[in-house]
Amino acid sequence: MSRIDALGYLVFGVSDQVAWNQFLTDYLGTMEGATGGIGDERVYRIDDYAARIITIPAAEDDIAVLGFEVRDAAVLAQLQDKVTASGVEVVRADQDHARRRMVDELISIRDPDGNEIEIFHTPRRCPDQPFFSARLSSPFVTGAEGLGHAVLATQKISEMRRFYCDVLGFNLSDYIDIQLGPEFMTEAIFLHCNSRHHSIALLAAPFPKRLVHFMLEVENIDDVGRLYSETEKHGVTISGRLGRHTNDRMLSFYMETPSGFELEFGCDGQPIDPENWVPSRYRSTSIWGHERVND
């Protein structure tokens, strides 16, 4: 079956790689990894994968690439045929580019909003260099659930949903009706490709950046509390206070990254059974908390 298995990596275009390095390693507790030997990117690990977060120099601070993992070369070929049949252009990356991404093979496409997507198989792993965090007492939640999730702002919500579901094989998790202002109600659509409640969400709203936020999950609530309490010490700005979401039950808070988009950092996300999941519609994003700061 030609389908995406997980969100494998994220590539951010950033104007200040030094600030990102401090944010990711000194504050979040990721581990700096070895690069593919080409270009100016910096690579970060959160598990045994050689590359989960990549920063590249850019004038525009935003998402540069979403990297989605498939099982093997056969599935990649099937998905390439499916994408081509849908009328979307496919570019097969050369070996230098694949080496930079620490994978065996990948193709590049763009979604209806122009976001670049890389679909890959066989990521490099580092069993001889176990992941170690100087900050966290528990592991990041990855494995078959992938890196975490990403939320994209779009004004083409129907086209984007059709692309991610009909072409890439994501399935609907649920909807949330979101009040973004006194007179502006909009919709967020949450999509899954494995047992993580959502790997991609689409927010139907104009936004300063294409990426609204990305999410990283850890196993231990104490790590969430520790980072929440140490934001001021590390010069990190909280943008959404501690709370628990309605749909995935994630206990989390939001912070500003050095590029202006947000990171959600949390624990206790509720896995789903993809085969038997029944979508719902929620009237609010949170059961409690997540109050916006300085909006």
Image (cartoon, rainbow, N blue to C red):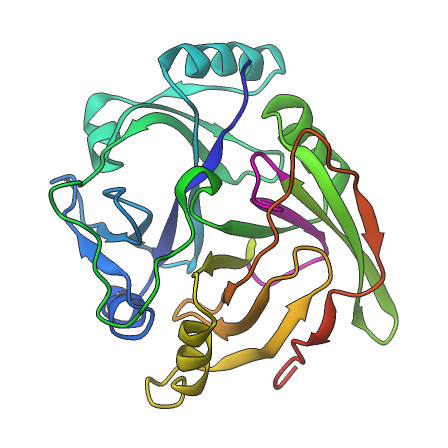
Q: Give the range drawn in magenta.
A: 192-209
Foreground residue, 286 or 155? 286
Residue 7, image x, y percentages: 46, 40
Q: Quadrant of the N terminus?
A: top right
| Location of residue 287 with respect to 11 vertically, above or below | below
Foreground residue, 100 or 251? 251
Residue 65: quarter of image: top left
Foreground residue, 283 or 100? 283
In the picture, measured across the screen, residue 12 lies left or right of residue 171, that is left
Please tell me which residue is depicted at 31% across the width and 69% down the height of the picture. 136
Residue 238, image x, y percentages: 51, 81
Q: Is residue 161 magenta?
A: no
| Location of residue 67 with respect to 180 vertically, above or below | above
Q: Is residue 206 magenta?
A: yes
Please tell me which residue is depicted at 47% across the width and 73% down the height of the picture. 256
In the picture, measured across the screen, residue 256 lies left or right of residue 205, that is left
Residue 47, image x, y percentages: 29, 49
Q: Quadrant of the C terminus?
A: bottom right
Please tell me which residue is depicted at 38% across the width and 71% down the height of the picture. 258
Residue 154, image x, y percentages: 67, 48
Foreground residue, 238 or 20? 238
| Location of residue 140 with respect to 29 vertically, above or below | above
